[in-house]
Image (tube, rainbow, N blue to C red):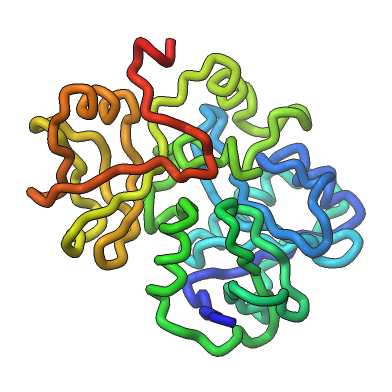
Amino acid sequence: MPSVALNDRAVVRICGPEAGRLLQDVLTPDLDKLAMNEAVGGALLTPQGKIMFDFVIARDGSDGFLIDLDRAIRDDFIKRMMLYRLRAKVEIAAASDIAVSAAWDEASPAQAHRDRRFRSGADVYRVYGPNASDPQDMLAYDALRISAGVAESGRDYALSDIFPHDVLMDLNGGVSFRKGCFVGQEVVSRMQHRGTARRRLVQVAADEPLPAAGTAVSADGKQLGVLGTVVERSGLAIVRTDRVAAALEREDEISVDGLAVKLMLPEWTGLGFLSATEEA
């Protein structure tokens, strides 16, 4: 089974008799439906509905949760959650004794949580323990994320600049529209019901190696979006879908730094490139 140590990730443990209620009221996913052996993506949003922190969350015993996120934002996340805790019977602390790894293809490893962000048929697991499993090249995991359409902050987008819909959280279990209020809920629910999402995560393919992350995706001299994670000839980007639709209708070449590319919405989403007129 391929296994990659995710050394750029850190874990926060949140536990206590009121931990589930606190997180259910603040974070985007529906944690009441989270099974013991599963992990889901999610976010803590700004009041304006943009992603302040993104993470993967799994249960830890009967009254605890493990939240794994980019190591660079762990301490800021803890500080923010402390503000929401108030007098709730909840403990929030960095779990420095826990390492994170990802494994896929073949049976579930021991003490693993199936990563429900991966909707393309691959069985991918989050593994938490004192030592991450033997790592392979990180590019293997990046290639897996590209093939499944799974974005992560710092690699594919900047925090506080993106709505959950932009990175497919409305479709991969990262946001619940049925559980009730959470921070930023009013904005993302309005986007959901009105169908006003204009940016989406897409897969990028080329006949030659793609340029580095941060390179603009363009057509007819107009920017459609920006490259995120890149592995050889494949990558991810967040683009304006209406602008892509217009470029396809005009049969304009879509390119990155002069290299022609093909943009694809992940097949599992069921989405298509619609113009602003069609979406309305």
Q: Is residue 87 visible?
A: no
In the picture, residue 45 is in which quadrant? top right
In the picture, residue 274 is in which quadrant? top left
Residue 6 is situated, as x and y percent measured from the top left of the image, at 51, 75
Q: Nearer the viewer, residue 240 or 273?
A: 273
Instruction: Tell me the residue at 46%/70% (across/down).
Output: 141
Q: Quadrant of the N terminus?
A: bottom right
Q: Nearer the viewer, residue 268 or 164?
A: 268
Q: Is residue 80 left or right of residue 237?
A: right
Instruction: Tell me the residue at 32%/56% (across/down).
Output: 235
Residue 273 is situated, as x and y percent measured from the top left of the image, at 37, 28
Q: Is residue 209 left or right of residue 47?
A: left
Instruction: Tell me the residue at 53%/39% (across/down).
Output: 269
Q: Is residue 251 visible?
A: yes
Instruction: Tell me the residue at 50%/59% (across/down).
Output: 73
> How many numbered callouts?
0
Instruction: Give above or below for 266 relative to 199.
Output: below
Residue 18 is situated, as x and y percent measured from the top left of the image, at 88, 49
Instruction: Give above or below for 146 relative to 216.
Output: below
Q: Is residue 71 left or right of residue 124?
A: left
